[in-house]
Amino acid sequence: MSKTAIILGASGLTGGILLDQIIKDNYYTRIKLFSRSKIEGLPNKVFQFIGDLFEIESFAEDFTGDVVFCCIGTTKSKTSDKNLYKKIDCGIPANTAKLAKVNGIETFIVISAMGANKNSRVFYNKTKGEMEQAIFKQNIKNTYVLRPSLINGERNESRFLEHLGIKVFNFLNPLLFGPLEKYQSIKAETIAKAMLYIAKQPPQINPIILSNNIKELLNNKK
């Protein structure tokens, strides 16, 4: 049976790795990318829809498939305006979930962050928490939220503080075990593999998956 995967955020670190993995996966015969700019050199099974993601409803006719992988996110260094930041990190995923619900897509998998909490006083954590709440409100049959700790991987753009943080976490990771294991940094490739794994599983998986549990999913797979 042919399957269609939808990806938002395929130009980012985790989304790009996920795209590469799905391209190689014969389980999916069609991949739909929704983004602001085109990615060159992709195979024929990938279909790109270019436009304004703040107006995701404008893609309604083409927004059909079996699973949505939402890897949308920005950073304070790239988006200093808090209103715009919230429109990207909360608004786009929330509106995408609404469209997925309307179009009958039964699986929605989104990357959030460790510490997400709609009641948090920390803007970043509060934004992620509100995003999660808005997505769960849609009651999509199979909804999964991944809450990774610091994501480790080679990005196209330079992020000095994040790069420094990754080095620190790589040093600390062996010391973070037991209750502290969830704070270990996690590879973007691990997150992408987990998303791909989750999409194929029966709906017994916990809908909120913490960083250490993301790794455990793949360990249990082996």
Image (cartoon, helix red, strand yellow):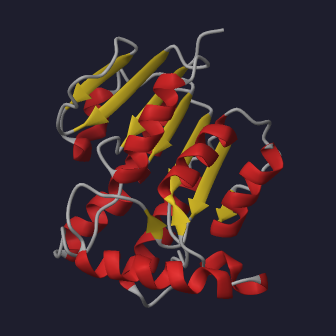
Q: Position of residue 166 (x, y in %)?
A: 42, 76
* Residue 90 in view, yes or no: yes
Would residue 51 appear left or right of 48 to someone viewing this image? left
Q: In the rendered picture of this protein, how many numbered marks are placed on residues? A: 0
- Residue 174 lies left or right of residue 216; in this view the side is left
Q: Is residue 85 above or below residue 73?
A: below
Q: Residue at x 40, y 45 (%)?
A: 15
In the drawing, does residue 103 fall left or right of residue 78? right
Q: Quadrant of the C terminus?
A: top right
Q: Work out whether residue 63 or residue 157 is closer to the camera in this orientation and state it.
A: 157
User: Which of the 4 image quadrants contains residue 36?
Assistant: top left
Q: Quadrant of residue 168?
A: bottom left
Image point 82% across, 50% down: which residue?
Answer: 220
Residue 173 position within the rendered picture, expressed as x and y whole percent measured from the top left: 60, 80
Q: Residue at x 43, y 52 (%)?
A: 94
Q: Nearer the viewer, residue 133 or 128?
A: 128
From this view, report whether residue 85 is shown above or below residue 173. above
| Location of the N terminus (image quadrant) | top right
Location of residue 72 in the rendering, given as x and y in whole percent from the top left corner? 36, 52
Question: Could one spot residue 141 in this view of the protein?
Answer: no
Residue occupying image coordinates x 47% and y 40%: 18
Q: Give coordinates of residue 207: x percent, y percent.
A: 70, 55
Q: Is residue 69 above or below residue 178?
A: above
Residue 73 placement, left or right of 197: left
